[in-house]
Image: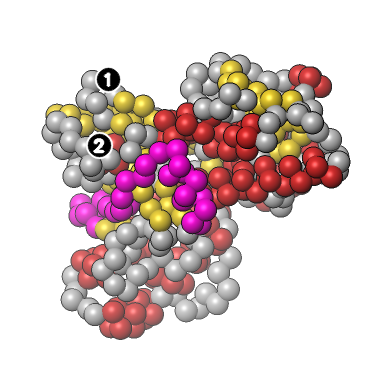
Amino acid sequence: MAGRFVLVGAGLSGAVIGRHLAEQGHSVTIVDARPHIAGNCHTERDAETGVMVHIYGPHIFHTDDAEVWDYVNRYQRFMPYKNQVKTTSGGRVYSLPVNLHTINQFFDATMGPDEARSFLTAQADTTITDPQTFEEQALRFVGQGLYEAFFKGYTQKQWGCHPSALPASILKRLPVRFNYDDNYFFHKFQGMPENGYTEMVAGILDHPGITVHLNTRFARDQAAAYDHVFYSGPLDGWYDFDMGRLGYRTLDFERFTHQGDYQGCAVMNYGEVSVPYTRITEHKYFAPWESHEGSVCYREFSRECGPDDIPYYPIRLMEEQALLRQYVARAEAEQGVTFVGRLGTYRYLDMDVTIREALNTARSFSTHLASGTQMPAFAVKPI
């Protein structure tokens, strides 16, 4: 029997789940408060230059998940793209992630891999045996010099606090390569959609069983009109923030154009606190198969997210964890709603993980529907 389902948010989670349900013969309504689909990966052509712009900051698709890679290529051809990030520190430009070229350039040396390993071992603070903070993690593995140049200032600007106040888990793995590989990601599949992410999401939503309403806010009391709600908005927003707001960082963008090439690369980080922005992105470099005389660039500024801002990065420090547990317990007592995506589960998710979880959630829901059992509030629990 066909059901009536509503998905709050026309980003990746809503589009993927909605497509699956529509293909199963259900009636799907998708609502989004913004005037466009695709959420924060929304892209559009700049009228002045013709450059495809990532409106909410760059999104580079990378994954080892073959099914997810096949899925996105079904709706948009992905072109080869290698993410090569540069950083300016101390008046010089280096490659990130830190690799053998970065190490040799920074220390004015010509070390080979084994020599560089031994050198950094000697630089590392071996008195730190169990790193608990971001700063301790960095000092333990790369030493004072590289930490000060590439991690300390950038992290302080990005998170709005000293790296000693951040957990070591943010710096998940040894941020060093002892070869000359400057590909930012390790994943097997990497690329960019030929005509942008918004066109890709439009393709996913292109089904007669799906109706999309933009510039439309959804309230909890509207849920009774549907058999089930999939909610990809902020978890605390579902409850009108009545127990307090979960913490996020947001981004401000300062757009400028340039005739010709401005910086010669897609992303230039600025590691020093004296530079107020974290990075400059030059968007024509995200589509290297295109050619444009003009260029569109954005300076990015990170700050605390206010009530009227777009949330980007969940903070998830101790204070947020305690509040999150309260909201999760409350959500788990609900029926008829499933919280999905980055905001709904208060987790930082890459695009491929978002799509994977959306596919899994949609399939799990179909199984629950067939068996007459209740879908849980979270397919993936936030804590």
- Residue shown at 26%/68% (left/top)? 180
- 338 or 29, which is in the foreground? 29
- Residue shown at 84%/35% (left/top)? 335
Residue position marked by numbered label 2 in the rendering: 284
Q: Earlier in the sequence, mark 2 or mark 1?
A: 1
Q: Are marks 2 and 1 in contact (CB under 8 Å)?
A: no
Disc 1, SS: loop
Kind of residue indicated by mark 1: Ala
The image shows residue 251 at horizontal and vertical percentages of: 45, 34
Residue position marked by numbered label 1 in the rendering: 47
Quarter of the image with the N terminus in it:
top right
- 184 or 112, which is in the foreground? 184
- Which mark is on residue 314? none
The image shows residue 340 at horizontal and vertical percentages of: 66, 40
Q: Is residue 28 above or below residue 87?
A: above
- 185 or 164, which is in the foreground? 185
- Determine which quarter of the picture holds residue 46: top left
Kind of residue indicated by mark 2: Lys
Q: Is residue 183 above or below residue 61?
A: below
- Residue shown at 36%/45% (left/top)? 78
Q: Is residue 81 magenta?
A: yes
